[in-house]
Amino acid sequence: MSKAIQFTMPKTFSANQRIVLMMLSLVVVFFVSLSVGAVEITLKDSVNIFLNEIGLGATEVSDVKTLVFKDIRLPRLLFTILIGAALGVSGAALQGLFRNPLVEPGIIGVSSGAALGAIAVIMGMESIFGSVPEHYKQYLLPPFAFLGGVIATFTTLKLGKYKGKVRVTILILAGVAITALTSAIIGLGIFYSDEQQLRAFTFWTLGDLSVATWTKVYIIVIPVIVTVAGLMYHARSLNALALGESEAYHSGVNVERLKNITILLSALAVGTAVAFAGIIGFLGLVIPHIIRMTISSDHRVVIPGSAIGGALLLILADILARTVVAPAELPIGIITATVGTPFFIYLLTVAKRKNLI
Amino acid sequence: MLRSENIAYQVGKKPILKGCSLTVNPGEFTAIVGPNGAGKSTFLKVLAKEIKAQKGNVNFNGCDIQELNSEELSKIRAVMPQHTNISFPFSIEQIIEIGRFPHKTSKKENDDIIESVIKHNKLEAYRGRLYQTLSGGEQQRVQLARIMAQVWDKSAFPKYLLLDEPTSDLDILHQHTLLNTAKEMCEQNMAVLAILHDLNLAAQYASHIVLMKNGEIYKQGLSEEVLTKQNIEHVFEHPVELLKEPNTGRTVIISIPKSVRNETYKQQNYA
């Protein structure tokens, strides 16, 4: 056998070492993100604010810095991490489930359903929800978007089932149909909306992390952790599924239960993420590929790796979004696509050359 | 013992299997042979509980398969598909490890078992390789290694390997390597049930033959009793000759185009 056709996984770092490396990068990016912005907060400041908070602090930090750190940067950063992890991990699980590298979380209809819920709230903000106190208005959109996402997902799942079994091809087509239908209704909404509503909706579809508050962090932390943990628990089953449905069944996997759990957990995470941060494209599609190409296709690596990778890329994107046109802010979706695409194309070129895909 | 009784299966109004009964004992290598469309693959799927027959029952070691869930079944029988396309790049070790899915054994034990099946299938040279970069024959040997890893654990009860045309696309070396390895497994309180297209491979490796035609089992029993000129010609509707291989004395089955044979008969009759 000639060396030219022998492809082995790169052996410089083990899979576990690479995951640890990613976590370390996450820590670094975490502190970089905290310090970037109009008010400069150094690493030393961050540590001191943290120590002051838990009552061990000895060094005074200015009130402005403490306030920006506590009420703006930290909740936004945690919000970003959770959203990134949710999108990355759902993309990984759904690609594994559909055995298709082209799948992105929107395929099960969740994003388009959420968009429908979002535009309904935006358009009804004055007429229907006019009496809602101003402070609570920001919490109106997420539940409706989530509900829209859940209804769309259940409809897709219901259409994709035949005799109690999920038919993957039918499920994908059902997702396409549901997306087309919701787009049509959204189009109708856009047609009847005024300038301001249209602008609000357009920005929502490009994603927005500036809406982060501690309350929102508390709300999304549970579904995201449940999803990541649940999908990690099923990582070995997803490996078996990579061989095919009947092969996985013969290996002892309860395939129908796996399909239902994966779809519902992904819908939970993506539904939550989209409901609170709008549609942030590209992450769910690209992150799992980056993990597979750079580390391994083993879902025990791809699932946690995509959660960390999603968080990492979204923080980086957010840093750019906040700085490029400062003091204004670019919609995050623009950045994830512009930052992600060249890197993804580079990886594709490498993978093509090595015959990995 | 693997036993099926009166399996009947139909799709819509079209019967695919019409009352197939079969018994496979540990230590036996049984080959299912028959023409295309005889219902061989469907029969194997029913035995593996991949599809449910409308009539009849299947049991492994006395347990009805309807009472067993996928995890319990996977510890008694392993199934090898005709082709396996995987969707993502996996190394051969990762593929083989999937065979360990149903077992709650430690990583160390799993690694030892993976090591053993790699040796048994002579796959040492392919360690660390990605599955997609292997040839069809090599991929099939990795799949055999995977299902061997699934039933490798010592147990008090017999286990079963169900193989669906494992050698269909393979060259002669790979055909023999694969079937030899499968046959060796029969010695470890296991039985092999394989659909084989090549009658000669069936004759060489199988102790027992199940001859199927039109959804029925036409004949079953010891290899030399079932694979006769008369039975084969009836089932395949094509002339064959059975010859003795001069060195080993083994029977070989050859088929000749009908037209050539008719021509020869005519000439013989004129002479």
Image (cartoon, rainbow, N blue to C red):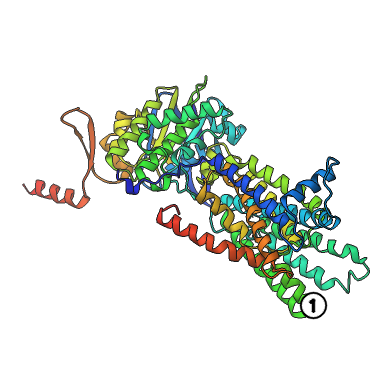
Seen in the image, is A286 located left or right of residue A357? Answer: right
- B14 or B113: nearer the viewer: B113
Mark 1 secondary-structure assignment: helix
Please name the residue shown 22% across and 29% down the image: B250
Is A161 rendered above or below residue A189?
Answer: above
Is residue A29 in view?
A: yes
| Quarter holding residue B27 | top left
- B203 or A85: nearer the viewer: A85
| Quarter holding residue A315 | bottom right
Residue under label 1: A196
- B61 or B183: nearer the viewer: B183
Seen in the image, is B170 located left or right of residue B79? Answer: left
| Quarter holding residue A338 | bottom right
Whole-percent x, y for residue B231 in the image = 30, 37
Q: Name the residue furthest front.
A: A59
Crowd class of label 1 (few under 14; some 14 to 19; many from 20; radius 10 Å)? few
Q: Name the residue furthest top.
A: B156
- Which chain hosts label 1? A
Is residue B215 in view?
A: no
Whole-percent x, y for residue B201 in the image = 30, 36
